[in-house]
C-alpha cells in the first residue's frame, strides 16, 4: 500500500506562481536543489492534471537540462484528464480519463512506491476533499506576490486541520513544512 502526498511550492501569501517571476521565484539555492535531486525524493509516482502535464512536458522538451526535469521525465507519471488523449508524448506518462479519486484509491492499494502530486491545484483539492491524502507538504518561498501572484493555492479548499510531522530550512530562507491533514466538516466546536 502506498501513501499520497500533496506537494506544493508556494509564496508566503499562498500563490503557486507570479507573473514575470522566474521559477522558484528565483530563490532556489544549492541546498534545496540538492534535496530535490536526492534519491529518496526521486522514488515515487507523480500525479498531475492536464494543465500541469502540458506545462511540465513542455519544459521537459524546451529545457531538459533544468534541475529535476530529467529525473521527472524518467519517473512514472499518472495524468488525470478528460481533455488529453492517449498516447501521451512525455515518456513514462499514463493517462487516466475516469474518476481521479477512485483511480488514486486503486493506485494506493496496488502501488508500492509513494504517490505525490506535482502542482495540479484542482486535482490536489479533490483528493484532499475525498480524504485520500496522507501528507501535505509545502515549501514556502519568502516572497509576497500580492500584485503579480496567480493561482492561489488554497482557494476553494475545505477546512483542514494540519498536524506538523516535520520542518526544515533550506539555504537559510526556504521553509519546508510537512503535515498530516484532517479534513473538517467545519470550524472546530461549531
Image: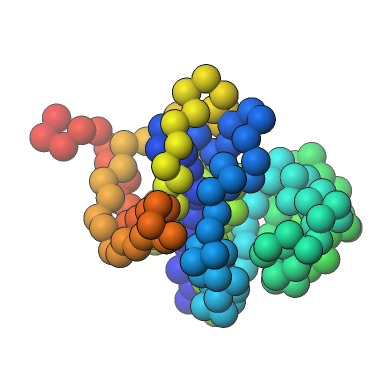
Using the rendered view, name the quadrant where residue 164 is placed.
bottom left
Q: Quadrant for the C terminus, please.
A: top left
Depth order, front residue of 10/83:
10
- Residue in view at x 81 percent, y 61 percent: 64
Residue 44 visible? The answer is no
**Viewer can see residue 172:** yes
Count of number-bearing discs: 0
Residue at 83%, 66% (x, y): give it: 91
Q: Is residue 69 above or below residue 52?
A: below
Picture quadrant of residue 184: top left
Residue 174's spot in the image, x, y percent? 42, 53
Q: Is residue 99 left or right of residue 181?
A: right
Q: What's the residue at 81%, 45% (across, down)?
A: 84
Which residue is found at the position 57% from the left and 28% from the top?
150
Which residue extends farthest top?
A: 147
Eyeballing the image, is 139 above or below 67? above
165 relative position to 71: left or right: left
**Picture colour scheme:** rainbow
Residue 114 x/y as whole percent: 52, 71
Q: Residue furthest left?
A: 189
Residue 152: give x, y in percent of width and height: 50, 31
Q: Is residue 164 left or right of residue 175?
A: left
Q: Position of residue 142 (x, y in %)?
A: 42, 42
Amino acid at each position: 500500500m502506498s501513501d499520497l502526498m500533496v506537494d506544493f511550492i508556494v509564496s508566503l501569501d499562498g500563490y503557486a506562481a507570479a507573473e514575470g517571476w522566474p521559477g522558484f521565484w528565483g530563490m532556489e539555492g544549492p541546498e534545496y536543489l540538492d534535496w530535490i535531486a536526492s534519491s529518496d525524493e526521486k522514488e515515487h509516482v507523480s500525479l498531475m492534471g492536464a494543465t500541469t502535464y502540458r506545462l511540465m512536458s513542455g519544459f521537459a522538451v524546451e529545457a531538459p537540462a533544468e534541475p529535476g526535469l530529467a529525473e521527472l521525465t524518467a519517473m512514472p507519471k499518472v495524468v488525470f484528464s478528460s481533455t488529453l488523449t492517449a498516447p501521451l508524448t512525455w515518456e513514462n506518462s499514463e493517462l487516466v480519463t475516469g474518476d481521479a479519486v477512485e483511480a488514486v484509491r486503486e493506485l494506493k492499494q496496488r502501488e508500492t512506491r509513494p504517490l505525490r502530486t506535482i502542482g495540479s491545484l484542482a486535482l490536489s483539492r479533490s483528493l484532499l476533499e475525498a480524504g485520500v491524502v496522507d501528507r501535505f507538504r509545502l515549501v514556502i518561498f519568502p516572497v509576497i506576490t500580492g500584485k503579480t501572484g496567480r493561482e492561489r493555492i488554497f482557494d476553494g479548499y475545505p477546512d483542514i486541520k494540519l498536524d506538523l510531522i516535520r520542518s526544515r530550512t533550506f539555504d537559510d530562507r526556504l521553509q519546508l513544512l510537512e503535515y498530516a491533514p484532517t479534513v473538517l466538516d467545519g470550524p472546530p466546536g461549531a
